[in-house]
Image: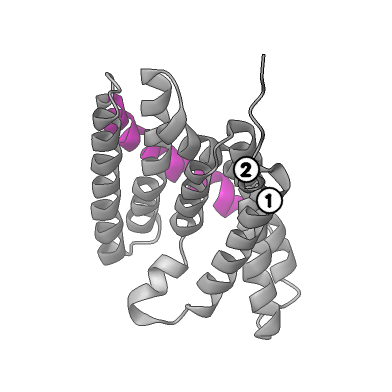
Amino acid sequence: MVTAPVSRRDAPATVLAATAAFGLLLGWATYRLHGTPWLERATNSVSTWIIWTAVAGALIRVRRLAVWGGALMMLATCGGYYAASTLGDTFGTGALGTAAVWSAAGLTGGPLLGWAGWTVRRGQGDVVRAVAGAVIAMVVLGEALWLGLALHYRGEAVVFLVVGALLTASLTACLARAGVRRYWLCAVLAPVGGLAFCLAEKGILDGLLGSV
């Protein structure tokens, strides 16, 4: 049996280095763009980091690397954000605990989102691909619920709901075009997952951030 050579572009070191660089740039950009009126909420959002992690997973060819890349991406994004904060003289002593919480959350959620992005594009099995699509969309829908119900930011919540609905519809349509027979599960599971994500963010993440 002949094994096809691995191209330099697909070599693990290259993939992970590119993913880390992408994460550092994203973290730096989200910090630097704070205060920009029409980007303020997008740059101060869990969804922004997580969606780009799913995109990175979709761009990686090997599933194992997509999972590891998701973890590295989120960790690098946190590093880029707080490095920019340090250079901007806004990283106080209290921010160290917050950075640790976000890094731990990223190491937990990053592999899942890296896997989800890879699975939607390259995975096998109708159900698992639909579930992966729902995992990606639920983040935006869940943050919409959190903004509206927990923070009472009604306008921002509506925008996130619209974006989440469009993302759900787009992923569902992509799965249908790819021949996934149970593509509709993505649209069904995304709102359910969004509610679970909102409850987890409010009950677990907010509790951890409030304790540091």
Q: Secondary structure at mark 1?
A: helix
Q: Is residue 102 in view?
A: no
Looking at the picture, how far across and down is residue 7, in whole percent? 64, 42
Residue at screen point 34% across, 47% down:
141
The residue labelled by disc 2 is 10
Looking at the picture, how far across and down is residue 89, in whole percent? 68, 86
Q: Is residue 27 in view?
A: yes
Q: Residue furthest front?
A: 2
Looking at the picture, how far across and down is residue 209, in whole percent? 62, 58
Instruction: Please state if 32 lies on the left or on the right of 10 as rendered.
Output: left
Given contact means CB atoms under 8 Å apart, are the residues at marks 1 and 2 in contact? yes
Identified by mark 1, the residue type is Thr
Image quarter of the N terminus: top right
Instruction: Classify 73 as above or below 2.
Output: below
The residue labelled by disc 1 is 14
Q: Residues within 10 Å of mark 1 (few under 14, many from 20)?
A: few
